[in-house]
């Protein structure tokens, strides 16, 4: 188990600096503060008790629990941008930030969840958990501190959350395609059982089809995982359908899925967007570099991180009813979408 000495060594600072950052006692330069927080995150280090806070009965820190299985690579853009927004806003706030990552789904029996009990926290941010049964949340009520779900929308209204308006994002994507004249629009999404984002984007897709008078075709729907391989395999499956049933457009529930769809289309000799249009969801920087550049729904991850800290501050101060906050998405139109080929004859 890493110690405060290990964190200090990795951050290149004295151990007293680490102590000041994690306990909120004394002054520390912003440069050193960021080094310590990054080192603590990399080493999965947290103080079991924040001694100074216990003595004064003041809670000086909020905790961030992130669930790596939602993003197999911690360097993924959405995590980096959201965490940057959180850290920058924490710097402005009266709180310090303690980080921990959880492997697996949210489970009170998980050893890593001791972080919730052993650290003297004013509140907790739970970042993108995957949960099959929301009764797993019940233990959070016993913490007697505000808990804010980040990038996850619990079904139970008792829990506070901040999330993108994923249904609205799906509406933007599918409405864009129907307005171009597409009627056979395939959908490639995530795991409906565990992910609220996957559920909302799929529901938004269905709602936009219905609004356009288009009946859902189960053969054009592929729900699975938020990764490139799922997009590639789904597109290959669509291309095996009879020619009259194949999609003229695909709405991918993440940009990473869209990259797989794009690869499979290119491998099959299809031209994008002349033969098939593709829309993603996220607006990663790399989505402007694909061939052609990807039309997508932008998530303002940095702003979501900032607003999460602001909302948690409000929950800590007011100790009132749970709060539910949505952040608006934005459609970014690039070169991967156009009217279907038969309308250009």
Image: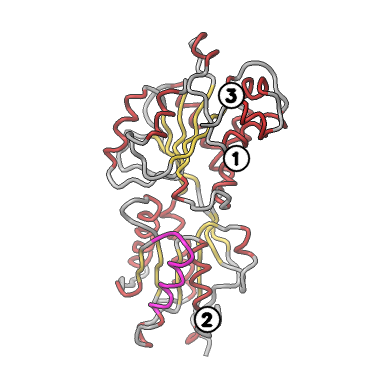
Q: CA distance from mark 3 to mark 1?
A: 19 Å
- Residue 37 got which mark? none
Percent across and percent down for residue 266 are: 54, 80
Q: Which residue is mark 2?
A: 267
In front here: 90 or 339? 90
Query: Was residue 25 drawn as part of the magenta stretch in this picture?
Result: no
5 over 233 or under it: above or below: above
Percent across and percent down for residue 333 are: 58, 66
Q: CA distance from mark 2 to mark 3?
A: 51 Å
User: Which residue is located at x 35 percent, y 64 percent?
Assistant: 223
Mark 2 or 3, nearer chain start: 3
Mark 1 or 2, nearer chain start: 1
Pointer 3: residues within 10 angstroms few (<14), some, or many (20+)? many
Query: In the orientation shown, which residue stands out farthest toward the top?
Result: 55
Single out the mark in the foreground, 2 or 3.
Answer: 3
Quadrant position of residue 156? top left
Q: Secondary structure at mark 1?
A: helix
User: Which residue is located at x 49 percent, y 45 percent?
Assistant: 327
Q: Which residues are magenta?
A: 225-238
Q: Which residue is mark 3?
A: 22
Q: Which residue is mark 1?
A: 85
Single out the mark in the foreground, 1 or 2.
Answer: 2
146 over 194 or under it: above or below: above
Q: CA distance from mark 1 to mark 2?
A: 38 Å
Mark 3 or 1, nearer chain start: 3
Query: Was residue 235 drawn as part of the magenta stretch in this picture?
Result: yes
Pointer 2: residues within 10 angstroms few (<14), some, or many (20+)? few
Percent across and percent down for residue 228 are: 49, 65
User: Which residue is located at x 62 percent, y 62 percent?
Assistant: 286
């Amino acid at each position: 188990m890493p110690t405060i000495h290990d964190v200090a060594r990795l951050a290149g600072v004295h151990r007293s600096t680490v102590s000041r950052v994690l306990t909120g006692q004394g002054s520390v330069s912003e440069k050193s503060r960021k080094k310590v927080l990054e080192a603590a995150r990399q080493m999965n280090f947290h103080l079991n008790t924040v001694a100074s806070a216990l003595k004064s009965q003041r809670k000086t820190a909020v905790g961030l629990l992130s669930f790596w299985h939602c993003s197999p690579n911690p360097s993924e853009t959405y995590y980096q941008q959201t965490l940057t927004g959180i850290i920058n806003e924490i710097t402005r706030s009266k709180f310090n930030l303690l980080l921990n990552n959880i492997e697996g789904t949210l489970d009170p029996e998980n050893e890593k969840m001791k972080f919730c009990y052993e650290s003297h926290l004013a509140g907790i941010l739970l970042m993108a958990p995957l949960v099959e049964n929301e009764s797993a949340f019940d233990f959070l009520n016993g913490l007697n501190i505000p808990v804010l779900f980040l990038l996850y929308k619990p079904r139970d209204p008792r829990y506070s959350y901040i999330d993108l308006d994923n249904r609205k994002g799906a509406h933007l994507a599918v409405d864009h395609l129907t307005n171009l004249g597409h009627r056979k629009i395939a959908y490639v999404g995530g795991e409906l059982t565990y992910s609220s984002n996957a559920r909302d984007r799929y529901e938004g897709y269905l709602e936009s089809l219905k609004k356009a008078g288009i009946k859902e075709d189960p053969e054009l729907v592929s729900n699975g995982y938020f990764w490139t391989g799922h997009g590639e395999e789904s597109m290959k499956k669509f291309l095996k359908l009879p020619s009259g049933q194949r999609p003229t457009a695909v709405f991918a529930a993440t940009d990473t899925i869209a990259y797989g769809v794009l690869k499979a289309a290119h491998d099959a000799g299809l031209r994008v967007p002349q033969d098939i249009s593709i829309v993603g969801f996220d607006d990663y920087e790399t989505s402007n570099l694909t061939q052609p550049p990807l039309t997508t729904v932008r998530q303002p991850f940095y702003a979501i991180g900032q607003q999460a800290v602001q909302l948690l501050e409000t929950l800590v101060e007011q100790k009132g009813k749970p709060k539910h906050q949505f952040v608006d998405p934005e459609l970014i139109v690039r070169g991967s979408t156009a009217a279907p080929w038969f309308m250009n004859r």
